[in-house]
């Protein structure tokens, strides 16, 4: 006999096989739930309590200040000198106008207050959405913290922090509507007047704010479309609503809201041009070399996202989505969310924050359903135990992110990133003219110098410039002929570059080596400033130039080696390192150089003190802990060397050289087995290494 369509494909059981009902969920007012929720909220707030380092923040503040100063929204390019006065579409003006008063009135505390309030608002709205979807246990609290681990890396002072609130609110509105539909379907209320209010008109306001806050406005339309596709048929009990009286019911109502949202999005200072920007990026800009060099636009870095458990979150969401589809039926909205936001985040890291927001309520609901189904009943006394377990789990998963070296915890700004001291030098010495800069430094320069047109950057955080300039700018970092083309075209008066170089950036090396044209006059961990020796500031260049201080990485070790071998050169380089260290509080590079020269002179105690100063100036400075380990080994402290090498590994990652050093330390401590293991790992990483091979031979082992 054939089974009915309703039961076909399902395994039916007799009455004795029916499982007990799922465990009851605790009330939101239960003390155990309140305590667990407060701990989860504290974890989420703490996750976004790390030093601000994003360079884009400064231009957001600068444009916000301009809006409040001019009492108008700038529609012209006032931020860079080559394209000054050209039309400029500033889709993020709403966020910038919002954030400036907080910074102006409260400084850093105002910015952190925004981070805390916006982040907690996002996950509170998402938790409410999950509860509208039926999640009522402790598990959703853990899901919120798990998603916040990934969200934290997009929690700098950026427009995404505002639009994430909008996205979360939009999901809550849609889920409130779906809950309302389920309520009617179950025969709730009786009279239409008792129905919960329709929240969907708020979607139109969200769309307008979003279009005036960030180019990601299209995500809001996509989410509206997902819920439109999954919209249930119209309920007869809805006929008394104002939408139904206007003829907007069933599928027609979501379409009407979508159309109204699109129409109101055109109400911005640039009209359709603002809405065209994300499509222009997808069709044209993303193919340009300058945009391909932006880290956040690159595909997802899985190794970076291991501590925040993003792979676990994605795998867990996929598994729970499949489980729910098999156990209770699929949710088309959830499937569309998964199929949209997961590929977006994998393809471009800038979408990881949106992924966290989109995933959180569905992951929370599915995890809650799974846990409650698995428990199959629970004694009331177990509620406190369950709350304690979830609270501890929330704290436990945060520990790796709290300890992440690249995002040190604290309320403040990481001044090792913006070119503050270089800009101080420009102000102190009244320098004006055509500057060349890397675009990431442009935001801080706009913040420091606007509206002084004679000090504005060459390129800002939005890569403003002509197609030709963007092309040659991108290649100037890797091709000296591209740099010469730009310099010939504009005849720059000064050059401001980040001192830290990426692997494919050689521009600072070329300019530093070109001592006939350029003079290095200021350098710290953040930025280096060069003046043209035959330009308008030639006298300043001659007076303040460093003669032997290495500008880029290529000259660093050769200059040190020459100074170590020659006492006269050592004295000159030591004096310039000392000047650089005194000129900026964030100059661990100069302090490290001083330490190496002191060690070469046999002043080991002074070298150790200087290295410790370098660590305090910049805990993320590479190689400093390795140098300390070498001093430890020279002094017979193998355990101290191992401790410093472990810190170096956390900073710099795996390398054959580092493993060889670790092997030496283990060998000095008398642990031949661990030494052999480290030497073998070094050879696996780089078989050409001779030192670990020789050390293994002396230990009686082979590669």
Image (cartoon, helix red, strand yellow):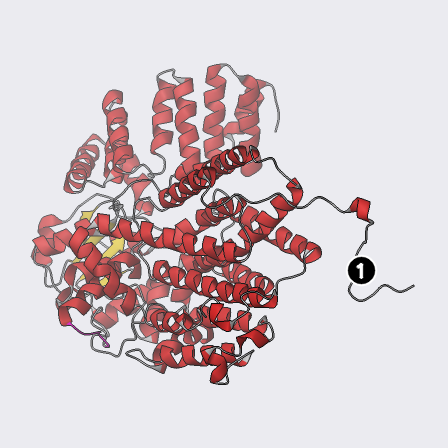
The relative height of residue 686 versus residue 429 in the rendered view (above or below) is above
Q: Quadrant of the N terminus?
A: bottom right
In the displayed structure, does residue 410 sit left or right of residue 307?
A: left
Query: Can you tell which quarter of the image residue 70 is in?
Result: bottom left
Q: Nearer the viewer, residue 315 or 644?
A: 315
Residue 61 % position (x, y): 23, 60
Q: Nearer the viewer, residue 499 or 307?
A: 307
Residue 354 % position (x, y): 45, 59
In the displayed structure, does residue 399 sit left or right of residue 549?
A: right
x 67%, y 42%: residue: 376
Q: Reply yes or no: does residue 133 show up in magenta.
A: no
As drawn, the residue found furthest toward the front would be: 191
Task: Give, as a single range, the part of the protein colored magenta.
Answer: 71-75
Q: Reply yes or no: does residue 72 show up in magenta.
A: yes
User: Can the viewer see residue 551?
Assistant: yes
Q: Nearer the viewer, residue 628 or 646?
A: 646
In the displayed structure, does residue 671 sit left or right of residue 212?
A: right
x 35%, y 75%: residue: 467
As drawn, the residue found furthest toward the right would be: 1
Counting the numbered discs, the total is 1
Q: Which residue is mark 1?
A: 9
Residue 168 % position (x, y): 43, 60
Query: Can you tell which quarter of the image residue 204 is in?
Result: bottom left
Q: Secondary structure at mark 1?
A: loop
């Amino acid at each position: 006999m054939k089974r009915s369509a309703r039961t076909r494909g399902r395994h039916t059981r007799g009455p004795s096989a029916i499982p007990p009902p799922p465990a009851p969920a605790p009330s939101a007012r239960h003390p155990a739930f309140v305590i667990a929720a407060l701990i989860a909220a504290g974890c989420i707030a703490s996750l976004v309590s790390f030093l601000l380092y994003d360079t884009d923040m400064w231009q957001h503040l600068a444009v916000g200040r301009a809006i409040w100063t001019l009492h108008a929204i700038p529609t012209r390019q006032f931020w860079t000198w080559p394209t000054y006065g050209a039309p400029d579409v500033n889709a993020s003006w709403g966020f910038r106008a919002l954030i400036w008063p907080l910074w102006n009135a409260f400084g850093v505390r105002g910015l952190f207050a925004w981070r805390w309030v916006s982040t907690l608002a996002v996950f509170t709205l998402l938790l409410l959405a999950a509860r509208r979807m039926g999640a009522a246990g402790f598990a959703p609290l853990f899901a919120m913290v798990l998603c916040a681990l990934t969200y934290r890396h997009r929690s700098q002072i950026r427009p995404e922090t505002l639009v994430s609130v909008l996205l979360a609110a939009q999901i809550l509105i849609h889920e409130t509507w779906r809950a309302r539909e389920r309520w009617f379907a179950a025969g709730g209320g009786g009279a239409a007047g008792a129905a919960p209010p329709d929240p969907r008109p708020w979607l139109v306001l969200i769309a307008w704010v979003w279009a005036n806050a960030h180019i990601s406005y299209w995500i809001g339309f996509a989410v509206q479309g997902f819920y439109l596709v999954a919209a249930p048929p119209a309920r007869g009990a809805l006929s008394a609503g104002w939408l139904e009286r206007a003829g907007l019911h069933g599928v027609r109502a979501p379409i009407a809201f979508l159309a109204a949202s699109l129409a109101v999005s055109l109400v911005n200072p640039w009209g359709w041009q603002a809405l065209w920007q994300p499509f222009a990026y997808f069709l044209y800009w993303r193919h340009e070399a300058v945009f391909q060099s932006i880290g956040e636009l690159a595909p997802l870095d899985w190794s970076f996202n291991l501590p925040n458990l993003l792979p676990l979150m994605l795998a867990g969401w996929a598994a729970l989505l499949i489980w729910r589809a098999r156990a209770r039926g699929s949710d088309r909205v959830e499937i569309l969310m998964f199929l949209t936001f997961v590929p977006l985040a994998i393809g471009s890291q800038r979408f990881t924050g949106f992924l966290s927001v989109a995933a959180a309520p569905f992951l929370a609901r599915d995890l809650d359903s799974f846990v409650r189904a698995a428990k199959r009943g629970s004694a009331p006394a177990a509620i406190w135990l369950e709350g304690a377990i979830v609270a501890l789990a929330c704290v436990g998963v945060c520990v790796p992110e709290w300890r992440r070296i690249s995002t040190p915890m604290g309320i403040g700004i990481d001044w090792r990133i913006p070119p503050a001291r270089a800009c101080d030098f420009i102000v102190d010495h009244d320098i004006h003219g055509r500057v060349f800069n890397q675009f990431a430094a442009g935001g801080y320069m706009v913040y420091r110098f606007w509206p002084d047109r004679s000090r504005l950057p060459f390129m800002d955080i939005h890569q403003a410039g002509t197609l030709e300039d963007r092309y040659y700018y991108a290649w100037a970092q890797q091709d000296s002929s591209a740099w010469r083309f730009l310099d010939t075209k504009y005849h720059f008066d000064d050059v401001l570059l980040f001192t830290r170089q990426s692997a494919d950036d050689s521009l600072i090396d070329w300019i530093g080596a070109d001592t006939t044209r350029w003079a290095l006059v200021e350098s710290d961990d953040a930025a280096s400033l060069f003046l043209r020796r035959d330009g308008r500031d030639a006298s300043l260049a001659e007076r303040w130039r460093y003669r032997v201080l290495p500008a880029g990485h290529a000259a660093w070790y050769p200059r040190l080696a020459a100074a170590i071998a020659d006492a006269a050169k050592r004295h000159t380089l030591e004096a310039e390192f000392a000047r650089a260290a005194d000129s900026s509080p964030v100059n661990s590079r100069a302090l490290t150089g001083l330490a190496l020269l002191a060690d070469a002179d046999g002043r080991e105690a002074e070298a150790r003190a200087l290295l410790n100063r370098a660590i305090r100036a910049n805990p993320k400075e590479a190689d400093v802990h390795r140098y300390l380990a070498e001093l430890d080994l020279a002094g017979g402290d193998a355990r101290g060397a191992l401790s410093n090498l472990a810190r170096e590994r956390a900073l710099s990652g795996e390398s054959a050289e580092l493993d060889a050093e670790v092997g030496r330390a283990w060998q000095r401590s008398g642990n031949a087995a661990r030494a052999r293991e480290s030497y073998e790992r070094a050879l696996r990483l780089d078989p050409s290494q001779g030192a670990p091979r020789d050390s293994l031979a002396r230990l009686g082992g082979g590669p």
